[in-house]
Every structure is written in C-alpha cells, then in structure tokens.
Image: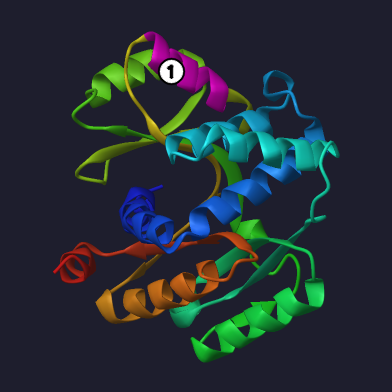
Amino acid sequence: MSGHSKWATIKRKKAVTDQKRGSLFTKLVKEITIAAKMGGGDPSGNPRLRLAIDTARDNSMPMDNIQRAVKKGTGELEGVIWDEITYEGYGPAGIALIIETATDNRNRTVADLRHIMSRNNGSLGESGSVSWMFQRKGALEVSRSAATEDLLMELLLDAGLEDLNSDDENYFNVITDIKDLESAKKALEAAGIAYENAKIDLVPENYIELEAEDARKVIKLIDALENNDDVQVVYSNMEISESAMNSLNE
C-alpha cells in the first residue's frame, strides 16, 4: 500500500481548508443522518453511526447538531431524505476515482459532477468501471510522536492489523478489516495512544505514481468535486512521487 499515506498527507491539509469553508459540518450531518436512518439511533449498536459521531466530535461539532442529525435520521424530527449514490470515473493521467455522494436530487448531482469532471480533464464512467480496483478497509492514523512502529505492531496484531504504512514522515497509517476497526481503536485507547482520522476507507490494490504536474491536476479535480455539497468523499489510486511531494510542499 505504498503511497497511501503520502496522499493522506495532502488530504489532511485539505481537510483543514474544508473545515474553514464550512463544508465539513454539512457532510458530517449528512453522514450522521444517513447512518441513523440505516442502522438506528443508538451508536452502541450502529458502528457506522458511532464512527460518524466520533468524527463529528473530533471536529468540534456541537452536540446539539449531532443529536438533531440523529433524530432526523430516525424520523423523530423532519428532515431532508438523502440518497447515497456512488459514481466512478477517471481523472488526469488515467487516475481512477470513486465519488460517494448524498443527495436529495440525483439529476442535479450527476449534472454537477459531469460538469466538474469535464472542466478538469476527467470523465464519469459506468458503474463497476473502477470499483474493482479498490477494497473497503478500516483506517486510522497515529502520530509518530505517540508510538513507535514496533509498539504499534505489537499492540495491533491481535486487533486485526492488516498493514502499517510508514511512508508519511509524521504519521503511521493503520489499515484493518472493517470489522476490526473498533478493536484497533480500543487497543490504542487502552494503551493511552492517541489516534486520528478513524474511518472506513477505500484502499486501492495498486497505485499510479504521479509527478508534480499531473498530481496538481488530480488534486485540483478532487478539490472541485469535494467542494460540491452533494459529494461526501472522493477516493483515488493516486500515488505522489517523492520529488512531486517536495514540489507540492514548496
């Protein structure tokens, strides 16, 4: 899974910008509402809801907002009915993209996505055109200042660890089976090790390494997609070369 955490570094920086734009709370409210609708309003029995609430708390969302979103999902409060739709396509340099959306108007969403893709050297594809390249996994990040690689391996091998990526100079990227993500979180909590960005992720089986020029184009496209209110998350199989990372960080 080499390169995954390099892209995670870029996404982490982008997330700060997203939060400043105010779009992050909108996406989190949608996820909480959908999770509550699908699996009920009790986070102890609804792993997706528990993860969504934890993410909202980590991003300082007020508890009142979280509770309202849960109640809209369970039908206790009136609210918009969100449909989850996944789109697939290609970006510059043949990069595969999976775009997960939550929308109240499918026609608007697909029209917006086609427009964004066409303006940024991308194109939407048929269902299944790129999803075979990805596997859904649990993922979280641990700061290198919080633990050593050997300690993480020791703590997490019995908690479902599948891969420990150490490409990022500041973070270890922990990959687990989806069902083991909660076990990994509990193992770290029991050891007093802080983690960040726990989530369900789509991890590519293989990456396409890009140099700076193409990487900038793909990042511009992903930025444009994620700026759309209907888009929840965008996954890609982009790997950024070391020289490109240095150029992007300048």
Q: What stretch is highlighted in magenta?
A: 181-190
- Residue behind mark 1: 157
Classify 94 as above or below 31: below
Q: Which residue is drawn at 18% across and 65% down?
A: 249
Q: Residue at x 44, y 80 (%)?
A: 93
Horizontally, residue 158 falls left or right of residue 148, namely right
Does residue 89 show up? yes
- Report the magenta stretch's main SS: helix
* Coordinates of residue 14 in the picture (x, y in percent): 36, 60
Classify 24 as above or below 53: below
The amino acid marked with disc number 1 is: Leu
Q: 90 or 36, which is in the foreground?
A: 36
Q: 33 or 132, which is in the foreground?
A: 33
Q: Residues within 10 Å of mark 1 (few under 14, many from 20)?
A: few
Classify 236 as above or below 116: above
Q: Which residue is drawn at 35% across and 55% down?
A: 16
Q: 163 or 123, which is in the foreground?
A: 123
Residue 194 colored in magenta in the image? no
Horizontally, residue 224 falls left or right of residue 112, namely left
* Coordinates of residue 28 in the picture (x, y in percent): 58, 48
**What is the quadrant of the C terminus in the image?**
bottom left
